[in-house]
């Protein structure tokens, strides 16, 4: 009898632990998910970021404005990156942002969102989709709100583009729960002048809580005033590689599709 009791107290905690661990593995059988996203279609993305991602067999999401100089001059390289599994995300045709109302003197008057209509914004987003389809041949991708803005004045345009994308990335810094995430306002952490250790801490938090973590990069080793040192950026990538058994690293479109198809287990 004593031996049976001993076995009972050994086996029951193990069964409970396995169940708890199983509940955490909601991200494609991983503890958490990480999306590496890069905005504005920069040369450094092709020259410095994509080569290291490819070397580690990672795929990122690159949000390209239609008027990106690097898209115009290096279109074949972007097409090749898409063929290797990187997502070319929609970042509008001309990257409009609210200018006058937000005191942003750097916003060109022609692309001041304050002077847009909802119809113009939606038309330009859809035209950007056609442009990207001509580059990569794909019809399923995500959208990134320029300057994080999903409205013109009091008029929100998110509902008008839901059929055009599998999801959309915002700029509010939060880790996302698969059961409650709004896939048309996915939170992200904009990275500027951070260390690799800072980024790894965010990944650790995502692992501990079983959440989705989206990184938002602009310049990597230069070319943008929102920038991170290339070496610090790569520290994150090497950490992700060392821990990819626990972390699902994928383009945001793939993660958004997974969220759409994920069935929330019924509560016991």
Image (cartoon, grey):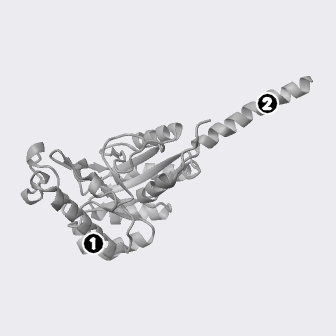
* Residue 87 % position (x, y): 39, 64
Does residue 93 appear in the picture of this structure? no
Q: Quadrant of residue 4?
A: top right
Residue 10: mark in rendering: 2
Mark 2 / mark 1, whichever is N-terminal: 2
* Residue 48 % position (x, y): 36, 62
In the image, is 143 to the left or to the right of 243?
left
In the image, is 50 to the left or to the right of 131?
right
Residue identifier under label 1: 131
Residue 162: mark in rendering: none
The foreground one among 45 and 17 is 17
Residue visible at 47% across and 43% down in the picture: 203
Few, some or many residues within 10 Å of mark 1 (<14, 14–19, 20+): some
Residue visible at 39% across and 71% down in the picture: 138
Quarter of the N terminus within the rendering: top right
The foreground one among 63 and 253 is 253
The foreground one among 112 and 84 is 112
* Residue 228 % position (x, y): 32, 49
Which element is circle 2 on? helix
Vertically, is 56 above or below 155?
Answer: below
Residue visible at 43% across and 55% down in the picture: 256
């Amino acid at each position: 009898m004593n031996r049976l009791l001993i076995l009972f107290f050994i086996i029951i905690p193990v069964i409970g632990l396995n169940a708890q661990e199983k509940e955490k593995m909601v991200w494609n059988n991983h503890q958490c998910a990480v999306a590496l996203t890069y905005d504005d279609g920069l040369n450094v993305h092709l020259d410095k970021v994509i080569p290291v991602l490819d070397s580690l067999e990672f795929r990122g999401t690159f949000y390209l404005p239609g008027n990106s100089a690097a898209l115009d001059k290096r279109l074949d390289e972007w097409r090749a990156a898409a063929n290797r599994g990187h997502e070319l995300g929609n970042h509008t045709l001309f990257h409009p942002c609210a200018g006058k109302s937000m005191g942003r003197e750097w916003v060109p008057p022609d692309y001041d969102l304050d002077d847009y209509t909802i119809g113009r914004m939606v038309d330009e987003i859809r035209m950007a989709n056609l442009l990207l389809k001509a580059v990569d041949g794909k019809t399923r991708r995500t959208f990134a709100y320029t300057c994080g803005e999903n409205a013109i004045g009091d008029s929100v345009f998110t509902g008008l583009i839901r059929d055009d994308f599998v999801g959309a990335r915002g700029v509010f810094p939060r880790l996302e729960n698969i059961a409650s995430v709004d896939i048309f306002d996915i939170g992200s952490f904009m990275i500027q002048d951070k260390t690799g250790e800072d980024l790894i801490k965010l990944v650790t938090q995502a692992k501990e809580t079983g959440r989705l973590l989206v990184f938002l990069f602009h310049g990597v080793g230069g070319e943008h005033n929102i920038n991170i040192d290339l070496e610090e950026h790569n520290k994150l990538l090497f950490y992700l590689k060392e821990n990819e058994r626990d972390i699902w690293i994928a383009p945001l479109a793939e993660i958004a599709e997974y969220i759409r198809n994920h069935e929330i287990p019924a509560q016991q």
